[in-house]
Image: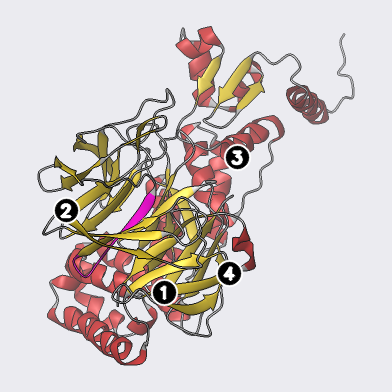
Amino acid sequence: MERAVAISSKDYGLDVLVKFNRFREENKYCDFIIKTEEKSMPVHRCVIAAGSEYFDGMLSNDTKERREGIVEIQDADSSTICKCIEFMYTGKASVSDEERGNLLHVSHMLRLHRLYNGIAILLENELNCETFFTTRVIAERYDCSRLVEKMEAKYLDFLLSADGMMESDRVKCKALMVWVNYESERAASLFSMMKHIEFTKVSLSYRRFLIDHETAVSESNKCLKLVMKSILDEEKVEASDTSLDSGIIVLDHNSMKMKILDVKDGTCTEMQDMHEKMRSKISSVVILDEYLYALVEGGSNYRIKYTECNARWEAVAQRNGHWGLAVALNGCIYVTECNYYSKRIERYDPFENQWIFIPNRINAIANTAVAVTEEYLFEFGGKYESSTSALDVQRFDPKSSTWAKAGKLKEQRYLASAVTLDNVIYIFGGFSSAAIYTKNFEMFHPNSNTTELVTLPNFVCVKFVSHALDEMIYLVDGRGEMSPKIHVYNPKTRALTNVMTMDGISMRTCESVLAVTN
């Protein structure tokens, strides 16, 4: 008669997993590779098939991935995939606030049910007014029905408990619109709840967004008047209190000062000091509402209330990319990765102080020119990994989070600059191929997705940034030279009218200057 030996099967199973994980770290006996855009990670087929229904289905059938021994996952970054692999080998996971959405998305995609449910429970346990909007978006996107139901039941408690919390009115406003839009009958109580929101603490861009895009607001005369009054009152205050004139803000590395250039007389006025971290390269600067944001090489980001003389820089959330070009649209900042061939774009929400990846663009490309209209983000040209310059125009719709092709340029170009004026996008400069610069610029018409080529006689400027101000376009030399030149272009006459020089100023990149208007 056989008798059971006193062995802990649970401990034995854990010991085997620990050894498998050590083998993985040593690349020992690995027979499969999980690949992202940035990294290749060796794994064992038996472990990932046991841990994930996604991989079990892939490796149980005659798939290309099974035959070739490699799978490329394009919808996730390597950090998130590493966490999923670590979970499959150890049953453990840790996640920062910024990574929760990405990890929930990937664990849902890979069918890692324990990890997916664990993150959902974590979000549920930490649910409060400050996390309400972000959590609601995550819950609906990844079908966390239990979490959605709990948020519905607790919404009014969150809204009422938000009083006195830092920037709570921003959170309350966004959360309120999510709650109202969930069921059309709730619109009837919108005004009574909006009266509890102090709209001066909500950004102007979001208030305008409420009027233009939230039907529940625009169709209620009381709600509409409430929001419009706050906008008119604030615009009056800004007009009387600010002493900053329209101009071009420059981040001068020679003096480590911000300066504003008066385009009428060419004089520069000193503003605030630059942050010490900006001694490294700045990849882009952009203005959103009352803040100027500076994106630094490596992923660090800072902002300052540039109209306040005594304002100080403050750090905001770290982005995932390394070197990005930023534009502002609908109250958010969008950043395209410049120096890497990628389909990814990140979006920063200042309300939540959070970066997320938006759906992949159509082409994996680098060094595109980017501009926005009131509704869309456009990318022009760029360079493929094959070193071929592009003609493509890609359009992103933030309402539907979708990309579409929007015509083609007349000439191939990368490292160009784009700016919007009177619903026409002007694309200047750049290279058509290695060391061959483009001598013409193009006018893109978003309504028809058509372009026209324009020649400027005797004009040679390869790399710069362009700004539209007072019906003129200013082309600021961005080759890193001392005392850069600014070429002034008149779209009505289609001619260069003037050249200014910023004496004594040093800009390291073309992204270290931007236009500002009151």
User: Nearer the N terminus, badge 4 or badge 2?
Assistant: 4
**Which mark is drawn over residue 256?**
4
Q: Amino acid at mark 1?
A: Ile
Residue 252 in percent (x, y) is at 52, 66
Question: Which of the pair 28/350 is nearer the observer?
Answer: 350
Q: Which residue is mark 1?
A: 260
All told, the count of numbered labels is 4
Q: Mark 4 or mark 2, which is nearer to you?
A: 4
Residue 459 in percent (x, y) is at 27, 47
Q: Gap between marks 1 and 3, in whole Å?
A: 40 Å
Q: Main secondary structure of the magenta part?
A: strand
| Residue drawn 53% across the image and 85% down it | 310
Q: Mark 3 or mark 2, which is nearer to you?
A: 2
Q: Is residue 400 visible?
A: no
Q: Gap between marks 2 and 1, in whole Å?
A: 26 Å
Q: Which residue is mark 3?
A: 79
Q: Gap between marks 4 and 1, in whole Å?
A: 13 Å
Q: Report whether 295 appears left or right of 438.
A: right
Question: Magenta residues, as a range?
Answer: 464-471
Question: Which of the pair 511/331 is nearer the observer?
Answer: 511
| Residue drawn 39% across the image and 59% down it | 485
Q: Amino acid at mark 4?
A: Met
Does residue 101 sit above or below 329 in this rendering?
above
| Residue drawn 60% across the image and 39% down it | 79
Q: Amino acid at mark 3?
A: Ser
> Are there few (<14), some (14-19), or many (20+) residues within 10 Å of tag 2?
some
Residue 484 in percent (x, y) is at 43, 59
Question: Which of the pair 223/442 is nearer the observer?
Answer: 442
Q: Which residue is mark 2?
A: 424
